[in-house]
Amino acid sequence: MQKNKKATIIIIIFIFIYGLLAEFIFSTKINRIYTYLLNPIIWIGIALILKLTLGKSFEIKKLKKDIISYSLIAVLAYIITYLISGLFITFGKNPYSRTLLGIITNLWSFATVIIAKEYIRYKLINNVYEKDKIKIAAFLSTVYIIIDLGIRQFFTTQMTGLFIMETFAQTLLPLIMKNILYSYTAINSNYLPAMCYELGTKLYLWLSPILPNAPWIMVSIIDSVIPLILFLYIRHEKNKKDIFRTKEKLINSDPRNIIPLAIGIILAIWFAIGIFPIKPVAIATGSMQEELHIGDVAIIQKCNANDIEEGDIIEYQMEGYTVIHRVVSKTQKNGDFTFITKGDSNDSEDSEPVTEKQIIGKVIFKIRYLGYPAVWIHNLSVQQQLEVRTGN
């Protein structure tokens, strides 16, 4: 069949309409039937129709082989990164069912949809001429992102700056990175690299007996950065095989130029969220004003009760928030330590003693003024929550 841009656009629009129906009607009215029967059948059906009606596309076999190899290496990097992160945080039980029935259900309900969607992406992008491929890839990727993002939540959840920020970082950014990668591999190879990466990472999450109890920001970083690095490697490999390449173009596309920066950003964010034995905390109140000013960053070292002495400044957990105050006395009863704390600028000691279970760590040094951006974001979040509660 001859390449047909109009037919391609119509099919993408149909996919978008189906995604909206699935989001607002099928997944709410007939949830189980939709998830386990209707959705896989419809995606497989679209893929089969495209296979039977659209012609074959030209592929660079050597490049395709290299791209698949890079994709499998990226899956391994993804798994190793998750496992390494688990060394700094706790592991938990895998929430996915690992019984034979559970594995088969996941493979049918989700793996088949992944395979079908990436095959559809490949067929539709390559059903137009070269000059239109990027436009069609962007259009289809936008539709896929909207479908996978779950736009119904934006109609059922109170819109706050914090919600939008978390949704962008946790869900939207990884979806954008993956769709850029998968569209690029569909243009320059075929559907197999995208399938290898998406299925490989999902199978790890489905089948691993334990998973790190990773905070959402860590998951966001892993799910965004690894596809980005894989994209850069594939682009560099393509440039190496381009007969019209220049030395400058090849140097600029070398992913080794950005990997150290990416690793540095990942480590900095992991440090900021407390993955390592020490973490930064921005000071948002003036209760320790003589020692810690608003906008300072206190570096907290994780420790237990035995490591804390009178005069130390500790961070401890309260219900819904943490406090950084100085220990004024330490007592032990029946083997358990109890601490009396006080803010240096406060007139009296804290009303409740601090138990061992509440201890997070102690301050080992401080950095002046570095925490002002975090304090501003915190205050903005608190203000928005108050506005939501008061209905303003």
Image (cartoon, rainbow, N blue to C red):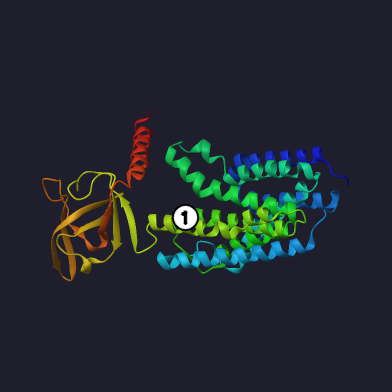
Please name whichever residue, 231 or 75, is drawn nearer the observer in this view of the structure: 231
Residue 29: where, in percent of width, then height? 60, 42
- Going by the picture, which residue comes out furthest to the bottom? 335
Identified at 85% across, 44% down, the residue is: 3
Residue 349 in view here: yes
Left or right of residue 240: residue 226: left
Toward which corner of the image does residue 206 lie, by quadrant? Answer: bottom right
Residue 203 in view here: no
Please name whichever residue, 211 or 383, is drawn nearer the observer in this view of the structure: 383
Report the amino acid beneath label 1. Answer: Ile
Residue 82: where, in percent of width, then height? 50, 64
Please name whichever residue, 307 or 235, is drawn nearer the observer in this view of the structure: 235
Residue 297: where, in percent of width, then height? 30, 51
Identified at 71% across, 64% down, the residue is: 66
Q: Quadrant of the C terminus?
A: top left
Please name whichever residue, 264 or 310, is drawn nearer the observer in this view of the structure: 264
- Going by the picture, which residue comes out furthest to the front? 247
Q: Is residue 140 above or below residue 95?
A: above
Toward which corner of the image does residue 241 lie, by quadrant? Answer: bottom right
Label 1: which residue?
265
Q: Is residue 61 above or below residue 166?
A: below
Q: Residues within 10 Å of mark 1 (few under 14, many from 20)?
A: some
